[in-house]
Image (cartoon, rainbow, N blue to C red):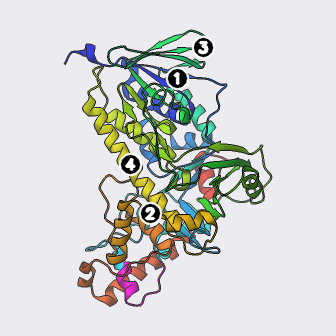
Amino acid sequence: MSTDRRISRIVILGGGTAGWMTAAALSRSFGPTVAITLLESDEIGTVGVGEATIPTIHWFNDLIGLDEAEFLRETKATFKLGIEFVDWTRPGHRYFHPFGQYGAPLPGVAFHHRWLKARAEGSALPLSALSLAARLAGDGRFARPVGDARSILSTLGYAYHFDAGLYARYLRRLAEAGGVVRVEGRLRDIVRDGDSGHVTALVTERGETLEGELFVDCSGFRALLIDGAMGEALEDWSHWLPCDRAVAVPCARVAATTPYTRSTARAAGWQWRIPLQHRTGNGYVYASAHLSEDEATATLLANLDGEPLAAPRTLRFTAGTRRRPWRGNVVAIGLSSGFLEPLESTSIHLIQSGITKLLTLFPDRDMDPALADRFNGLFGRDMDGIKDFLILHYHATSGRDAPLWQHCRTMTLPDTLVARVAQYRRSGRLILDSDELFREASWLAVLDGQGVTASGYNPLADALDADTNRAQVEQIAQVIARAAPTLPMHDDALAQLIGAP
């Protein structure tokens, strides 16, 4: 293949988390063989108000060669073992979605069927007792997983909370050190080829022309390239996910770090709490049809741990996706490709999902449409799977009577979600595709936590003696209960790793 068909110039529109993650990954992957330019303006703010992540973040950090201790120091990050859901099922109730796995690998049937069998035969052991991550989170402790499957520590998973602004700044330094050229300025014009319709250059307000063969749209909700130039409209999902606003404010830290994100249901949405080293991030995601901005702000400010550190800011959005985030020679990554509220901390994942797929399917200058079709299909499945998982949280509520919750409890669900919940209710089975983001432990945590119970289990579990099975399940809970108090408190573990006092 002739090298003159290779892409030699990439232009990224927009900075922030998405832009600088993309720039860092591309520069790390291609080195000096591809020139990468990023256009952003200091006058345009970014959405990031504090980010919580899921364990897939480790793939990205490994890709760009991050040192974990340096990353934690630079971004004021803390460790995250999962998400606590407060008042979702009904007021006064809480459950935990842990990272990692429940129980431990045992021969035969999947572990959660062992637990379901034991429960059907009289065991009162709660699911939470079978997660080391859940136990550590509740105790304010943290440990990193180990590779030895014989250790209960091998069942752990973890992610991070970090300051989004510091993260983007950190990635910018790494990307620029890798050769990325940042251009300060606003976009004025988009130049397109008259025959193919491909974008050929971006023109800044200062008159600079940034030419390229591939353009990555990281312009956030404005979607200046994928929508503005290529005409790819947003598929609106607000009939399933009606929250369309968020008011956010940081507050002072007042206690030891809780190594998890907290989501508390409110009358018209939910409130997040994200603990960082230097502050706590807070926000109220709500449906403007049921609550005013002033009421949302007042509710948020009345439910902070500490003193507010800035004025509250409001974000507006529409849940949905673009079915073709890659059109022509434009690839949308981040908020420009679509938006799903941060209930399960998937925003960063969807950025790196787009980056992963772009690297895997990276085109030549001819922009093979089959590559774009594959990218769009895979990314669409990602979005659809996460969408269904989020809808489950809103729908499976029994004790919340405000109008938003009544709507969500009675709304028509996607067929895919209806089938999945029905299968779990019948047989305890979780039928997942191999490339789905949320695996069995995640679905099990939310289904069980929100009161969706299984009436059956895999018949293969009946090959196990009932007393032996129950004893083995309870033994794992005992191992977790013994191990947890021996592990360090979160802040001690963090300080040891980053060298802080």
Separation of disc 2 and disc 4 at Cα?
Answer: 21 Å
**Magenta span of residues:** 115-126
Neighbourhood count class around disc 4 (C-alpha, 10 Å): few under 14, some 14–19, many 20 upward: some
Of labels 1 and 4, the one closer to you: 4
Task: Please say if the residues under marks 1 and 4 sit with CB atoms less than 8 Å apart.
Answer: no
Is residue 277 visible in the rendered image? The answer is: no
Q: Earlier along the polypeptide chain: callout 4 or callout 3?
A: 3
Q: Residue at x 55, y 75 (%)?
A: 398
Q: Which residue is mark 3?
A: 205
Q: Earlier along the polypeptide chain: callout 1 or callout 3?
A: 1
Neighbourhood count class around disc 1 (C-alpha, 10 Å): few under 14, some 14–19, many 20 upward: some
Depicted 85 relative to depicted 191: above or below: below
For this orientation, the residue located farthest to the top is 207
Residue type for callout 2: Thr
| Residue toward you, 162 or 297 | 297
Neighbourhood count class around disc 2 (C-alpha, 10 Å): few under 14, some 14–19, many 20 upward: few
Depicted 59 relative to depicted 267: above or below: above
Q: Residue at x 51, y 39 (%)?
A: 335
Q: Earlier along the polypeptide chain: callout 2 or callout 3?
A: 3
Q: Which residue is mark 1?
A: 176
Of labels 1 and 2, the one closer to you: 2
**Residue 27 rendering spot, x and y as whole percentages:** 43, 26
Residue 227 colored in magenta in the image = no
Task: Please say if the residues under marks 4 and 3 sit with CB atoms less than 8 Å apart.
Answer: no
Of labels 2 and 3, the one closer to you: 2
**Residue 422 rendering spot, x and y as whole percentages:** 36, 71
Separation of disc 4 and disc 3 at Cα?
Answer: 36 Å
Q: Which residue is mark 2?
A: 412
